[in-house]
Image (cartoon, rainbow, N blue to C red):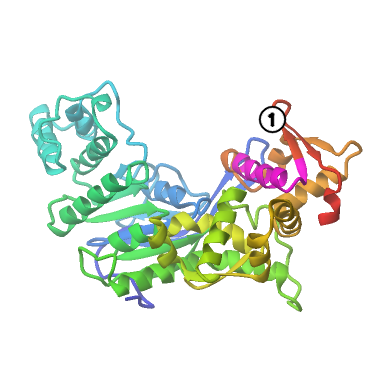
Amino acid sequence: MTSSDPRPTGAVIIRADQVTKTFTTPDGRALPVLEDIGCQLVEGEIVALLGKSGSGKSTLLRCMAGLIAPSAGTVDYRGTPLTGANPGVSMVFQSFALLPWLTVQQNVELGLTARGVPEDERRERALKAIDLIGLDGFESAYPKELSGGMRQRVGFARAIVVEPDALLMDEPFSALDVLTAENLRTELVGLWEGHEAPVKSILIVTHNIEEAVLLADRILVLSANPGRIQAELRVDLPRPRNRQDPRLEALVDTVYGILTGREAAVAAAVTAPGAPTRPAPTPVSAPLPEVSVGGLAGLLEILVARGGEDGLAELADELNFEVDDLLPLVDAAVLLGLAATDGPRIRLTAAGREFAAADILTSKQLFARHAATRAPLVRAIVQALSSTDDQRLREGFFLDVLRRGFDAVEARRQLDTAIDWGRYAELFDYDADDGVLTLEPGAQKNL
């Protein structure tokens, strides 16, 4: 199912060699997003770029599309280094990216118009693509008249009508409801297997483990902050793939184990007695998972009810979630020392059992201790507030510090999560009107 050399034999369409990408924050600091990425896309394969938020998946996709240039390294299209937009690719976006004032047919014809294709040929090719993706009869409709799934079909038609070498897709199903997404995935596989789609390869960005395993011939797993290729796996399973196939379930478990390895390492560095001295985790190296305390408590209570240990795939199936929907909750539990993972399984620690069994007041006290000692950003906020005369600081101070390691959106998300955790634990308060954080009495005793 996996191999040490997963690269298929075929003509290389796109090759990334030692690609590094660093953005500059508004205050002039460097924000590394990708580091030393090497990968390729060859004819006859579907490749999935899989990783959590912050792994640089979309940035790598845009580098390979030639929409942004790497800070170091090169991207080649059929052996020629890119100096602009990649002439051999089309893109499908998460947000559909349709022009609302154009009809379905006009949106599909956009790429052909840009390439100077004559009007009659444009019309013929556009209608063929519209028919292929199941929107025959909607040629004259406007995007506002279409459902989300139909709009994404227009996006697919617009991408394939130019007959690109490679179809690049940036989380194309994540904005759709579950049933619509499943239907479109199935149809995409059908077009690919039937050789009806006029493309030679597909590269899809996703954070959904099961989606990657269902679709891809190869999976590139990216770590985060900055993004690096953590693993490369070959999926040697016939299509269409069965979710209940033990081989598919085993590969999902393998990928899950890879994605959770970093959080386990962080927890080990903080908690293992007698462990060798390692760099202390920081708010950037150990970011807070975007989960609420209530959601975290719910996961722990479910684990208690299931004997304190379970497989993530089994747990997700029982709750009607995707496995990766649970990942942020698992990451938070591991970061706080309330649970531990062993490959695809999760088990409560003694601290987790204590927290799950506690009354509300005691659970707040326990959470305060765990958050202040094991969540680097929460600890940093408590320490910073403790160092001021009035034990107050504006949120802008923390956002400025966080922007050294995150973009503005993620910095805000990190601070919001920390505020949620800190207020629950009564470590600090937050005035949303003034944007001021204030240390709560007695918070320092938890450090």
Residue 19, image x and y in percent?
48, 56
Residue drawn at the location 50% of the way across and 58% of the way down: 327
- Identify the residue under disc 1: 432
Left/right of residue 12 with respect to residue 134 in the rendered view = right
Q: Which residue is drawn at 32% across and 70% down?
A: 248
Name the one closer to the observer, 141 or 332: 332
Place of residue 280 in the rendered image (x, y in percent of width and height, measured from the top left): 74, 63
Which part of the image, by quadrant, shows the N terminus?
A: bottom left
Q: For the residue marked with disc 1, what is the amino acid?
A: Ala
The residue furthest right is: 389
Residue extending farthest top:
101
- Quarter holding the C terminus is bottom right
- Residue at 65% across, 53% down: 284
Q: Main secondary structure of the magenta part?
A: helix
Residue 227 appears in view: no
Q: Identify the residue at horizontal 25%, vertical 63% (top origin).
A: 11
Segment tinted magenta in the rendering: 411-428
